[in-house]
Each structure stands twice: as structure tokens, then as C-alpha cells.
């Protein structure tokens, strides 16, 4: 699958989903190309590089977690779920499956405190990086 098809697939999988926290935010999908300008490689995709690419100060707090950990609440069925909640659950499970099946070295960077910028980053088959971003609010 080329990058354009992958980005379209990720957009489709995340369409209509709002990541629930104290505020609900949609997902944005974009691509970071591994070019000479970004000098982005598997070896240098560090927390500092992510802060630089996202425009955050280097001293911003960052927590790195797995995709499964980040989506654990959204992908776990509760016994009180009705039809709407089950449909949302299935969409989240499909999104996580799409991420896991199409990207390598997947990591979730939670940047900041209280209003946290989230970047789900994984390497594509071409060596570029697909990114899903959202925001969570935790007070």
C-alpha cells in the first residue's frame, strides 16, 4: 500500500471518532516524509525530534505509551453498552487494527499537561511516518 492509500485508510478508520476525555477531540491524519529536510529516520525519531516537529518547546513534558495502552478504554467493551456504544467500540477496534497492521514502530506521544497533544506515530512501508493527532484534556 502506498502512502496516499494508507493515509486515506487511516482517515476513513478515524472518521467520525472523537477521543473522549474531559473534552472530545477529533483525529487528524498526516504524513511526515523522511526527507533530507526533516532528516527523519527510525534511529532519530526521539522525543526531542517529535517535540521539534510538532513545534513544542524542548522542555515540554512527554509520556510515550503503546497504541494498545492509549486506546485501552476505547477498545474495551462494557456490559452497559448499547448499540451506539458498541458501534463506536467497533470503530475504535478497527482503527487500532489498521494502525497495527500497516505501521511499524508504533508509539503514542502524549505532550504537555492538562491539555495534552497526542501524536500516534508509526513508520510506513516506504520509511515515512504516518501520524494521527488528537488532544486530550485531563485535569
Image (cartoon, grey):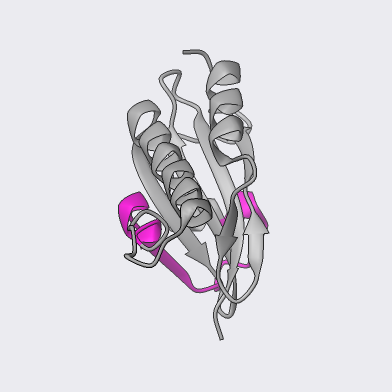
Give the residues drawn in magenta, as a range: 51-72
Q: Is residue 70 magenta?
A: yes
Q: How far from the left and from the top, in percent, is residue 95? A: 45, 39
> Along the horizontal axis of the image, is 91 left or right of 116?
left
In this view, the residue farthest toward the bottom is 139
> Along the horizontal axis of the image, is 92 left or right of 138?
left
Q: Nearer the viewer, residue 51 or 89?
A: 89
- In this rendering, does residue 56 appear at all? no
Q: Note whether 97 is above or below 116 in the view shown.
A: above
Q: How far from the left and from the top, in percent, is residue 92? A: 45, 46
The image quadrant that residue 20 belongs to is: bottom right
Please name the residue shown 50% across and 33% down the image. Answer: 129
Q: Note whether 96 is above or below 128 in the view shown.
A: below
In this view, the residue farthest toward the top is 1
Please name the residue shown 40% across and 56% down the image. Answer: 71
Number of dots carrying numbers = 0
Q: How far from the left and from the top, in percent, is residue 12? A: 59, 31
Q: Nearer the viewer, residue 118 or 47?
A: 118
Q: Nearer the viewer, residue 41 or 7?
A: 7
Q: Quadrant of the C terminus?
A: bottom right
Q: Nearer the viewer, residue 104 or 14?
A: 14
Q: How far from the left and from the top, in percent, is residue 49? A: 51, 51
- In this rendering, does residue 16 appear at all? yes
Q: Is residue 129 magenta?
A: no
Amino acid at each position: 500500500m502506498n502512502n496516499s492509500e494508507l493515509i486515506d485508510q487511516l482517515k476513513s478508520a478515524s472518521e467520525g471518532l472523537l477521543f473522549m476525555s474531559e473534552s472530545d477531540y477529533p483525529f487528524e491524519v498526516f504524513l511526515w516524509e523522511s526527507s533530507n529536510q526533516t532528516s527523519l529516520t527510525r534511529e532519530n525519531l526521539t522525543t526531542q525530534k517529535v517535540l521539534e516537529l510538532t513545534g513544542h518547546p524542548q522542555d515540554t513534558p512527554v509520556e510515550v505509551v503503546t497504541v494498545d495502552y492509549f486506546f485501552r478504554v476505547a477498545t474495551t467493551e462494557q456490559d452497559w453498552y448499547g448499540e451506539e456504544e458498541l458501534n463506536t467500540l467497533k470503530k475504535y477496534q478497527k482503527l487500532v487494527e489498521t494502525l497495527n497492521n500497516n505501521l511499524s514502530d508504533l508509539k503514542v506521544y502524549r505532550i504537555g499537561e492538562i491539555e495534552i497533544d497526542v501524536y500516534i506515530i508509526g513508520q510506513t512501508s516506504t520509511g515515512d511516518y504516518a501520524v494521527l493527532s488528537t488532544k486530550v484534556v485531563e485535569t
